[in-house]
Amino acid sequence: MNKLHVKKGDTVIVLSGKDKGKQGKVLEVSPKEGKVIVDHINMMTKHVKPRKMGDPGGIVKAEGAMYASKVMLVCPKCGKPTRIAHKVLNDGKKERICKNPKCGETF
């Protein structure tokens, strides 16, 4: 199983592509594909067919998946894009730590 540096609910910034520089919250993570879906980023148009009687069909905007390598985690304390370090505690649990030299906050 592949591991990703982001989790559901994290705030990320887009590093490359048409939405470069935009921030959003991670809605879904797919470690198998190495992709993430970010709120209001990489918007796609989807043609939806009405399934039941009375259901509206038409063109709907939805978020598309993007590679996790195109996003970088934003530290909740300092608000800057950062890489993360892992610190193993005495009880065996792992913590994610901000790599910015002035911050060092766990999240």
Image (cartoon, rainbow, N blue to C red):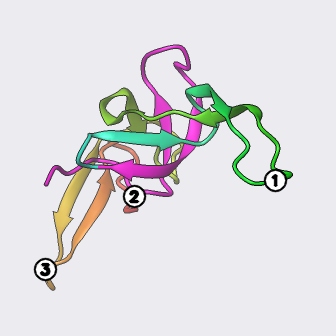
Mark sitting earlier along the chain (3/2): 3
Is 1 drawn above or below residue 62 in the view shown?
Answer: below
Where's the N terminus, which quadrant?
bottom left
Q: Quadrant of residue 95?
A: bottom left
Magenta stretch bounds: 1-30
Where's the C terminus, which quadrant?
bottom left
Determine the residue positioned at 46% across, 48% down: 75
Mark sitting earlier along the chain (3/1): 1
81 on left or right of 42? left
Label 3, label 2: how far apart the Cα atoms are: 19 Å
**Residue hosting label 3:** 92
Q: Amino acid at mark 1?
A: Met
Q: Amino acid at mark 2?
A: Glu
Point out residue 85 in the picture as x, y percentages from the top left corner. Answer: 23, 51
**Residue hosting label 1:** 53
**Residue hosting label 2:** 105
Q: How many marks on residues?
A: 3
72 on left or right of 84? right
Looking at the image, the residue that sits furthest to the front is 53
| Discs 3, 1 touching: Cβ within 8 Å | no
Q: Give the overall secondary structure of the magenta segment.
A: loop
